[in-house]
Image (tube, helix red, strand yellow):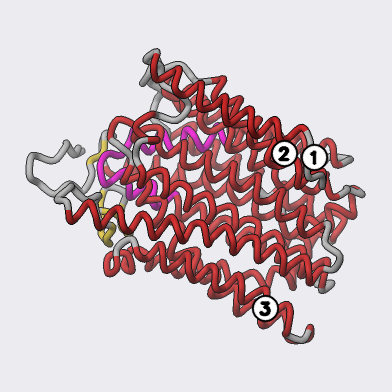
Amino acid sequence: MRTRGPPGPGSVSMGYVRTADDRASWRVLVVCLAAGVTTLLDQSVLTIALPSLRESLHAGATDVQWIVSGYSLAFGLALVPGGSLGDARGRKGLFLVGLVTFVVFAVVAATGANAGVVIVARLVQGAGAGLVNSQVIGTIQDVFHGVGRTRALGMYAVVAGVSSALGPALGGVLVSLAGPGAGWRWCLLLSVPCGVVTLVLAARRLPQPRRVSEGRLDGWGLLCVAVLTVSSMMPFITGTHVGWWVAGVVGSVVALVVLHRRRVRTGKVPLVHPALTRSAPFVLGTVVAMAQFGSAMAASLVLVLFLQSGLGMSALTAAAVTLPSAVAMVASSAIAWRVVRRIGSHAVTLGTGLGIVMLLAGALVVAVVPVPVLPVALAVVQLAWGAANGLSLSPNQARVLQHAPAEAAGVAGAILQMSQRVAAAVCLSAISGVYLRAETPEAAFIHASLVCAGLLVGALVACVVLARIDARSTSDGAPRPPRLVAGTGATGRGQAPV
């Protein structure tokens, strides 16, 4: 067996692994990626089955919004406390507990007799998924170091994106095979065998638990984030413009600022590490990731609803229209690091800009293209949309983590994921509210696409500012974050930042 130690002064680091050898670290990463696929696929696979679920359970618009957004909400809010508990008590046990919770409540949701049962089960299942994924991030941080860590996190980001893209296609196949009445139940059960296999692998291959930190969780800060998120979702769920949610938004923001400053002043670690809030590249990159992830999830949901409810397509035909997006995303994710090697972080800007163009193109296609050829036109747009996402999502996440200060590297991944999941919860509730309450399916699709494009415009502005910060740092002689290039290392073959 061989081990890799930290690189010597002046050497070029390829990352070193703290486990016995590279094969052991690869096995751990396989478990982590399997957990990511299992929990992230569960969100996207259900979107194609929402029309049949709504009809089968006689669910209202509010029920549908909670079903699609509640999972992401609970997922995101469980990440930070899960990471803190993993630091304090070891990760393996929490990983297994979270995965068992996820699998059990997947069965509860799939067998639910009414919308209320499904909503509650999805909330608990989302919390289990968040607990699992926080241990995934922490385990990668423990097993890999330096550039090897960034490579592993980049692979996790790619798997997450591809899982989200492939979900609707798999869901369409299941609904087609099982029929509308039972298809949505099979979509929810899809994660059960995947979860059981991952559970067995995790019990055998994950490192033994060890205590890492004695830090206490900022529970009040997390509560404020929960109140802020739910309050932000409520106007879209209830359809009201002014209500108690205004006080919830304002009050939670003020409380977050006060609590953050108080914990910093008293020497306690707040919900978001002070070093992260002081890093403009990390903050801006997180904003970009939130807009990208939220708009991608919402746009996929709107497309599926439009194809089935608006055009009357079967689930399988609708899945065929969304499939080009998944294929293009897989392909562009595979070459994204080569593009980054040539043009640097401008690849994220390019992908974000292309995403805006494709969202606007989709709205234009629905407005002017005749219905008989509309599915083909949308499939072409989806092809370019998937390529744009593959080009920007993973490189941006890797860039954000590279900009994380060393003293906050351990929590940066959890904060990034929490931000994305909270953004997804708000965007899904907002965009589904826009769609479900519009007068016609065509108008609903166009309005929702414009909102998603607006989110990406904000992300594009942040990308431009980030590029200027990087350029200014270089001209001032400050050290640049490592570039992302293709390479190999402790995790085997692949593309990685170095």
Marks 3 and 1, how far apart in space? Answer: 36 Å
**Residue closest to the eye, 51 or 177:** 51
Q: Residue 422, percent across and down?
A: 59, 41
Q: Tell me the residue at 18%/47% (across/down).
A: 479
For badge 2, the amino acid type reads Arg
Near mark 3 (Cα within 10 A), the count class, few <14, some 14-19 or many ≥20, is few
Q: As drawn, is 262 to the left or to the right of 246? A: left
Q: Nearer the viewer, mark 2 or mark 3?
A: 3
Residue 122: give its label: 2
Magenta includes 450? no
Near mark 1 (Cα within 10 A), the count class, few <14, some 14-19 or many ≥20, is many
- Extent of the magenta region: 130-156
Q: Tell me the residue at 75%/35% (across/down).
A: 121
Is residue 103 among the parts visible in the rendering? no
Whether pointer 1 and pointer 2 mark residues with C-beta atoms closer than 8 Å, the reply is yes
Q: Residue 487, percent across and down?
A: 25, 59
Residue 118: give its label: 1
Q: Residue 452, percent across and down?
A: 62, 61
First reached walking from the N terminus: tag 3 or tag 1: 1
Residue 364: give its label: 3
For badge 1, the amino acid type reads Val
Marks 1 and 2, how far apart in space? Answer: 6 Å
Is residue 439 among the parts visible in the rendering? yes
